[in-house]
Image (cartoon, rainbow, N blue to C red):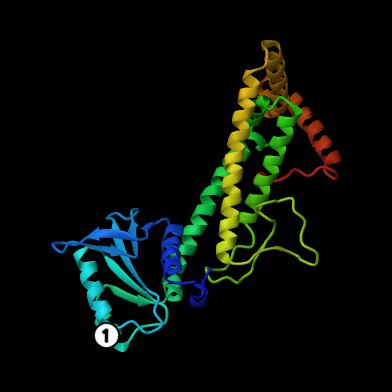
Amino acid sequence: MIVRDEEVAGWVDLQNRVMALFREMDYHAESPKVVPLAGRGQKEIDVYVEDRNASVTTVFLVECKWWETNVPQDVVHAFHTVVHGAGANTGFIISKVGFQAGAKEAAAFTNINLLTFEQLQHAFGEEWYRRQQAKIRQLEVELRQRHRLHFDQWNLLPIHNNMIFHTPDLAHRLAIAAKHCVNLVIQCGTRWPESYKGPEPVQMACDPADPFKELPEGKLWHEAATVRDYFSILRTAMQKWVAGFDSLCEEARKSFDGIDKDAEDALMSRAMAEQLEETPVRVLREHLGDAEYRRVLGLLAGKIADSAATVRIPDPI
């Protein structure tokens, strides 16, 4: 996840990377931005950051100094005045090489933080990692919800939900989408990076962009080069398949709406027959009587025992 200071291409690149870091944590960030100062006109800020999710909006101002020399104390004094005048909560001065002793003294006991870009990433590293996890977990919930609508073997609802996938092509594409969802959910439960620091590269049970992709020759795992790449690749794939599932369902609904009444009635009859077959035998208990009910259970138990060696019932995702 950490971008080394020497990897930054220059002042504008530094501003953009700082802005991107905060946006990855769901802060509102702009670069540059002109802010008003109390009674002192206005000032252009390199990076303006708001935490709009806080109970009271929190504002950070960031000054980027891509200098070949250490930042002196007068810069700290001037920036402290700007932060105070803008009513910001905290200020960050990001330096390429560091700060003079006087600058550190000037920032002591103030709300001004003196950091390199690497140090800024470490300062927010744990929060960044938690935010990425939360995004993946939310997408995992959305994938599971969609999968259960169509493939929950403990529920009769999929029989009716899948009725609209009335052509072989639609049914096949639904099965492919389900396979992608299962593999992505499995990936969410395996091989997480230990922290924002790595280790890197990050091992993955499957390639999220293509869960059917074969492993590279000689490799035991798929890999993401960095922790940031891991979360980005996985999040992008999950967002794609959440949207893809919804799009496919909408396409199936429109196709189903276009069939004639006889075909619709036939599909409904088939769905009702499948639901009847899947109805739990326990609903018949009061109608069969205790002895007959136990006999039916015995037949089922024998059938299950006969097929147990060849049939494995998968766990629902």
| Quarter where residue 268 is shown | top right
Residue 242 in the image: state x and y as whole percent.
58, 42
Judge by depth and name the residue closer to the eye, 68 or 208: 68
**Secondary structure at numbered mark 1:** helix
User: Residue at (68%, 56%) from the top-left corner?
Assistant: 207
Say which amino acid is labelled 1: Glu
| Quarter where residue 144 is shown | top right
Residue 313 in the image: state x and y as whole percent.
75, 43
Residue 267 in the image: state x and y as whole percent.
70, 19
Identify the residue at the far top of this view.
262
- Give the left or right position of residue 123, taking residue 159 as reference: left
Instruction: Give above or below for 206 relative to 274.
Output: below
Count of labels in the image: 1
Judge by depth and name the residue closer to the eye, 196 or 303: 196
Identify the residue at the far bottom of this view.
101
Residue 204 in the image: state x and y as whole percent.
67, 61
User: Residue at (31%, 59%) from the top-left corner?
Assistant: 33
Instruction: Give above or below for 230 relative to 184.
Output: below
Instruction: Give above or below for 27 relative to 266.
Output: below
- Give the left or right position of residue 230, taking residue 129 as reference: right
- Give the left or right position of residue 176, taking residue 57 as reference: right
Judge by depth and name the residue closer to the eye, 284 or 245: 245
Mark 1 residue crowding within 10 angstroms, few (<14) / some (14–19) / many (20+): few
- Give the left or right position of residue 289, taking residue 110 as reference: right
User: Residue at (23%, 77%) from the top-left corner?
Assistant: 77
Identify the residue at the far left of this view.
39
Q: Which residue is mark 1?
A: 105
Instruction: Give above or below for 165 relative to 187.
Output: above
